[in-house]
Image (spheres, rainbow, N blue to C red):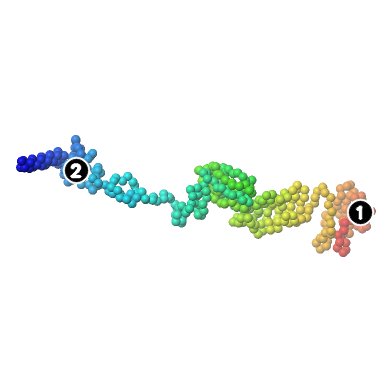
């Protein structure tokens, strides 16, 4: 009985070998001269293989024919994959990641070689802040805007219009301000204009927003809302009821005057004054002044002729070398147009005036009711 079981086992092994050999011959498609002949074989099935005389290698079929002699087969499903590291842990599987999970991708930035900072993002910066070129940060409130605290008031520089960009017109929206003004340096095509607004004292938080800027001319307006609030602007001063235009200003200084600088001012009492900045007086006693209703003009505190008002000249008025001279080109000169006989004549160092009559042929003496303007021998001026 034991011998029969051994015979059966040997027969099974023989059958298996025969099946394997038949299977091998079934998938072997033969020998071919050209690779193209193999690629174009009809009724190919997975695991078919053949030999190419052209390449000297075995070709195999899996969805398409491929050269098994290639280092990296194009159409092969490998028995095992590479083992990628994912977050530091090895796992045997097909990886669908371009890089491991703990990889930090570099910043996608471009620059013109002028960046000297070691970081592009400022330490402790927030999501609402923008890093400026000088290292400061400013907030971005939706649109291009900046929020200022009014405090005691001051000026906010809106933007700068640089040289040679006078095309188009930006639109500026502002609130809680009482003035919109501009300053400029240079002239004509070399002029640089700067726009400002004046924020009122105690007006709280003020937000300035640029609602529109021409996208085709981005260089026509620069430095938009890049400066903090300042107390004054070079060339212009404005306090409650006082404002002034300054001539010959220092464009590099703020809230100061320059030696030899003149100013044209509207003062707190609504007078107009012209004087050097260094000589400004609250009572307008220096320089030229015109009062609020233009009825009085004074120079260094002295009033000019006030038309329509009687005036008295007090004290003695001294003249050069104690002399008072009137030079006339005619012998007789009419000073009073009351009548055709009214005239004055130069007589003996004095001017004789008589509204009634006098003798034009006489060089001495006076008449009744005649007025004299004269300088006496001791240098006094008499009327």
Q: Which one is nearer the viewer's eye here, 283 or 166? A: 283
Q: Residue furthest right?
A: 368
Q: Quadrant of residue 378?
A: bottom right
Q: Is residue 93 visible?
A: yes
Q: Which one is nearer the viewer's eye here, 92 or 154? A: 92
Q: Residues within 10 Å of mark 1 (few under 14, many from 20)?
A: some
Please tell me whether residue 5 is drawn above or below residue 87 in the rendered image. above
Query: Whole-percent x and y of residue 171?
Result: 56, 42
Q: Which one is nearer the viewer's eye here, 339 or 181? A: 181
Q: Is residue 378 left or right of residue 122?
A: right
Q: Residue furthest bottom?
A: 378
- Residue at image position (89%, 49%) is 342
Pointers 2 and 1 in contact (C-beta within 8 Å): no
Q: Which one is nearer the viewer's eye here, 169 or 29? A: 29
Query: Whole-percent x and y of residue 89?
Result: 32, 50
Looking at the rendered structure, the secondary structure element under dot 2 is: strand
Q: Residue furthest top?
A: 43
Q: Residues within 10 Å of mark 2 (few under 14, many from 20)?
A: many
Residue under circle 1? 370
Looking at the rendered structure, the secondary structure element under dot 1 is: loop
Query: Whole-percent x and y of residue 218?
Result: 51, 46
Q: Which mark is residue 53?
A: none
Image quarter (top left, top right, bottom left or bottom right) of the N terminus: top left
Residue under circle 2? 59
Image quarter (top left, top right, bottom left or bottom right) of the C terminus: bottom right
């Amino acid at each position: 009985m034991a011998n029969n079981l051994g015979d059966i086992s040997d027969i099974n092994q023989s059958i298996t070998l025969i099946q394997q050999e038949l299977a091998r011959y079934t998938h072997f498609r033969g020998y071919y001269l050209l690779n193209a002949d193999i690629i174009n074989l009809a009724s190919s099935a997975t695991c078919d293989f053949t030999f190419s005389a052209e390449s000297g290698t075995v070709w195999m079929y899996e969805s398409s024919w491929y050269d098994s002699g290639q280092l990296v087969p194009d159409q092969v499903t490998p028995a095992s994959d590479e083992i990628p590291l994912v977050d530091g842990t090895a796992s045997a599987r097909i990886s669908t990641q371009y890089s491991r999970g703990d990889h930090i991708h570099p910043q996608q930035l471009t620059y013109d070689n002028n960046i000297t900072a070691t970081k592009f993002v400022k330490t402790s910066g927030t999501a609402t802040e923008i890093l400026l070129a000088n290292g400061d940060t400013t907030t971005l409130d939706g649109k291009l805007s900046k929020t200022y605290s009014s405090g005691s008031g001051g000026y906010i520089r809106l933007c700068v219009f640089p040289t040679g960009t006078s095309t188009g017109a930006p639109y500026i929206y502002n609130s809680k301000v009482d003035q919109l003004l501009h300053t400029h340096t240079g002239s004509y095509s070399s002029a640089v204009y700067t726009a400002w607004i004046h924020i009122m004292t105690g007006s709280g938080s003020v937000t300035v927003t640029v609602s529109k800027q021409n996208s085709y001319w981005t260089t026509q307006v620069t430095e938009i809302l890049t400066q903090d609030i300042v107390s004054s602007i070079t060339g212009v001063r404005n306090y409650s009821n006082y404002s002034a235009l300054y001539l010959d200003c220092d464009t590099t200084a703020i809230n100061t005057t320059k030696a030899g600088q003149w100013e044209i001012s509207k003062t707190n009492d609504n007078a107009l004054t012209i004087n050097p900045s260094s000589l400004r007086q609250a009572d307008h006693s220096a320089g030229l002044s015109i009062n609020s209703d233009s009825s009085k003009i004074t120079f260094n505190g002295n009033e000019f002729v006030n038309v329509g008002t009687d005036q008295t000249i007090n004290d003695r008025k001294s003249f050069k070398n104690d002399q008072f001279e009137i030079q006339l080109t005619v012998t007789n000169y009419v000073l009073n147009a009351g009548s055709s006989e009214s005239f004055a004549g130069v007589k003996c160092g004095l001017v004789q005036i008589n509204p009634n009559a006098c003798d034009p042929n006489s060089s001495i003496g006076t008449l009744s009711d005649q007025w004299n303007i004269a300088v006496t021998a001791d240098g006094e001026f008499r009327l």
